Amino acid sequence: MKRHAEAGNTTVIHRGSSVALHSFGSLVNMNLRLFAREPAAAFFTVAFPVMLVVVFGMIYGNEPDDMFDGYGSMDISMSAYTALILGTVGLLGVAITTSSYREAGILRRFQATPMRPVLYIAADVTANLIMVLAGMATVVVVGWGLYRVRFEGQAGSVVLAIILSGAAMFAVGYLIAGLAPTARTAQIIAMVTLYPMIFLSGATIPLEVMPESIHTISDFLPLTYVVRLLRGLWFGEPWGSLMFETSVLVGVLVICTAVAARLFRWE
């Protein structure tokens, strides 16, 4: 009897895991399809960074420059534009989409199912990371094709940094979604938060060409540490030399996740 009971429990666990995995895959697939149908999201994740590569590449080229430690403008821009994509997806995408789903009653319908909230969040984060990696891959392919951009790091380290940075930026997005009563309010808060960051963090224009006063401001912007972490790993710096940037992003992730969890509403 005991063996039969244990076998029955194992079957239930496996069946539950299978259902959860299927639900997770379905949610990821749904989010990716919704992304593909949203022109604005596709533009800022893929087209806009590519436009920056082409425009700034035509202006500055990619000749080695002492200002950039012997690298070219486009060399250092690959990691910076990846940070731009992370910030855009995290703040605009996560905040506005989550708020819109709540306002439209979609989150309430999710809540009525047996699905756990953590499964929805995990699927949303996974889909957003896939979008970020797709956008980054497009930027790098264009940058290499036009300017033969250099990469001296380890791909695995860069991907891990993207996951950490993405989790931190997504946590900020969920925090905004928790604070905003409507999708319109979330959009305003996200844009007011994001746009100063993308211009003052080095995500679009290198901080090397900025005045010292901008450097001081950039030290208070989370996206600055995404740019620094990705750029360091892109050119082969070890994680040990980037512990401060890593610690800041972990801090942003932990604090924003804790606050967002308290504020998150299904309806």
Image (tube, grey):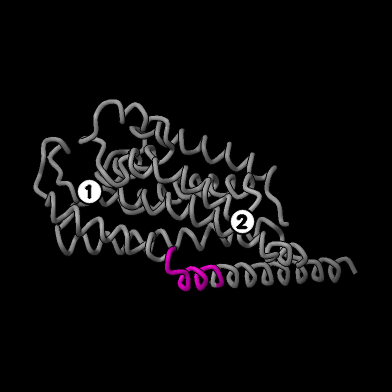
What amino acid is at disc 1? Glu
Residue 134 locus on image (x, y percent): 37, 64
The alpha-carbon separation of the residues under discs 2 and 1 comes to 40 Å
- Whether the residues at callouts 2 and 1 have beta carbons within 8 Å, the answer is no
Out of 76 and 60, give the one closest to the viewer: 60
Numbered circle sitting on residue 99 = 2
Q: Position of residue 27 (x, y in %)?
A: 60, 69
> Dot 2, how many residues are within 10 Å of its Cα: few (below 14), some (14-19), or many (20+)?
many
Q: Which mark is residue 193?
A: none
Q: Earlier in the sequence, mark 2 or mark 1?
A: 2
Predominant SS of the magenta segment: helix
Label 1 crowding class (10 Å Cα cut-off): few <14, some 14-19, many 20+? Answer: few
Taking the magenta stretch, the answer to whether it contains residue 42 is: no
Amino acid under label 2?
Ser
Q: Is residue 37 magenta?
A: yes
**Magenta range:** 30-40
Residue at image x 76%, y 67%?
Answer: 113
- Give the position of the N terminus as an image quadrant: bottom right
- Mark on residue 152? 1
For image coordinates 64% across by 40% down, the residue present is 258
